[in-house]
Amino acid sequence: MGKERSGGEKQKRMVVGVVCNFAAELKLLLTALLLLCTLVTLLQFVPSRFTISASDLRFCTSPIAASPSPSLSDTQSDDLLSSGILRRAFHPYGAAAYNFITMGTYRGGPNTFAIVGLASKPLHLYSRPAYQCQWLPSNTKQNNTNITSSLAYKILPDWGYGRVYTVVVVNCTFSDPVNLDNSGGTLLLHASTSGGGDSKFNLTDTIPALTEPPGSFNLSLFTSKPKYDYLYCGSSLYGTLSPQRVREWIAYHVRLFGERSHFVIHDAGGVHEEVLEVLKPWMELGYVTLQDIREQERFDGYYHNQFLVVNDCLHRYKFMAKWIFFFDVDEYIFVPPKATLGSVLDSLSDYSQITIEQMPMSNKLCHSVDAAKRHRKWGFEKLVYRDVKRGIRRDRKYAIQPRNVYATGVHMSQNLGAGAKTTHKTEGRIKYFHYHGTIAQRREPCRNLVNSTDINFENNPFVLDTTLRDLAGSVKKFELKMIGSRLYNTRQ
């Protein structure tokens, strides 16, 4: 017993000794844990727009990654040749633009894919970058012999408007269907510079463009009836938009497009809280999808990367809609009173693309009859003067049957499938009224009251046109029926 107690006391002394020897280290560890817990607690009270991701934490805990620089063996210096000529050396550092930036990758069928993204414009303008696609099955042990690769072709749909970056749609077509057994797999994009930027190197980036989990591939998507008859693909919304103008626009077009329609809105900074409140009722009813695309502002492309956004929307919803429309939120589609949008498009069903004539409306002129109550009237209800100046080429907007289109633009697509047709002869059947700039004005638009059926204003002839004004009452009743009076107090 005495020996056991003696042995126990020795063990206790040993433990105490160890603790004492590492007391400083334990204090440091406990202090670090306390600080970490405090930081986590404080982060809960930080506004939601300020976020710290896992990648940010990894960056903090890893060495700073420097841009690759030439090795000592590659570094050259100026050299005075025996001929008396001074041969100069050049030393490259860093990179001016990314090789490829993906936004989305989508199936175009059992053996085709579309990869939508941005790439360096100088690289495509002055060089010949190449792309190759590869499919890696998830079960590589069983399917290793089935790994296939495909040469890809690129489409540049932004008509040369790109800036630092241009829009690229890469089409991957394999000789055989991939993932038919639904075991899953990954689509790789091999993006090569082909010596562009530095003719000494052909740099290739391997990009995991799309991963299909097992059981996720739905083959019937390509042959089944589309979910929507009509889908709207909106361009990038930015700036300080008028909530009231957005309210009027969405109510008007949900009524026109009908129950089997959907609207995809892309927020590039323009959907502030008041605009969001206008969209929420329609989002709750399933008519509107709002996408936050503000991150694209990092990459300097044309007009808030407008071409990128519409191409992503095309391929994302390609098999979900019979027709896709492309126009802006200060533009209103119109069909004659005795027709419906469905009857008009049925009469044009032989065409994969139709373009739509513009009716330019004044954004300042209102009729004097509305002087006392203009603040209560909707924008398209009181802006009733149409520009009739002749000899001007006016932009058209368009609609497509998306299954026959490979890429698209802002005013029309130039990349239709084989045998697909376009018609511009749609006058009298469908047109759009354009209230240019009104969406970005948070003030009363009626700046000039006119008591006439025609007027010459700012060197342009205008005539009274009440086409949309006559529909205002029906649109207001429709909004009340669908979402109630929750938007009655919406501000300009």
Image (spheres, helix red, strand yellow):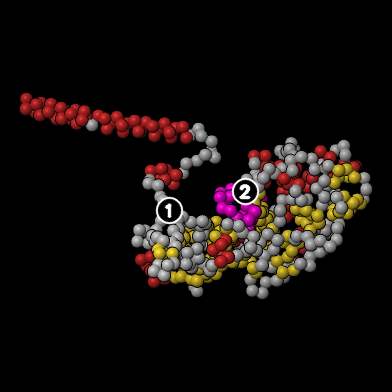
Q: In this picture, is 151 found above or below 3?
A: below
Q: Specify whether residue 291 is painted magenta.
A: yes
Residues 436 and 129: in front is 129
Give the residue pinned by disc 2.
268
Of the residues under marks 2 and 1, which one precedes in the sequence? 1
Q: Is residue 293 visible?
A: yes
Give coordinates of residue 90: x percent, y percent.
45, 60
- Residue 67 badge: 1
Label 2 and label 1: CA atoms lie apart by: 30 Å
Q: Amino acid at mark 2?
A: Ala
Quadrant containing the C terminus in the rendered view: top right
Q: Amino acid at mark 1?
A: Ser
Badge 2 density bin: few <14, some 14–19, many ≥20, Cα 10 Å = many
* Residue beneath the point at 64% across and 51% down: 236
Which segment did they paint magenta? 285-308
Residues 139 and 276: in front is 276
Q: Secondary structure at mark 1?
A: loop
Left or right position of 489 against 417:
right
Quadrant containing the N terminus in the rendered view: top left
Give coordinates of residue 98: x percent, y percent.
51, 57
* Residue beneath the point at 82% across and 46% down: 364
Left or right position of 380 against 66:
right
Q: In this picture, is 468 found above or below 120?
A: above
* Residue beneath the point at 75% across and 60% down: 395
Badge 1 density bin: few <14, some 14–19, many ≥20, Cα 10 Å = few
Give coordinates of residue 323: x percent, y percent.
68, 62
Q: Secondary structure at mark 2?
A: loop
Give coordinates of residue 351: x percent, y percent.
71, 69
Q: Specify whether residue 343 is painted magenta.
A: no
* Residue beneath the point at 74% across and 64% down: 355
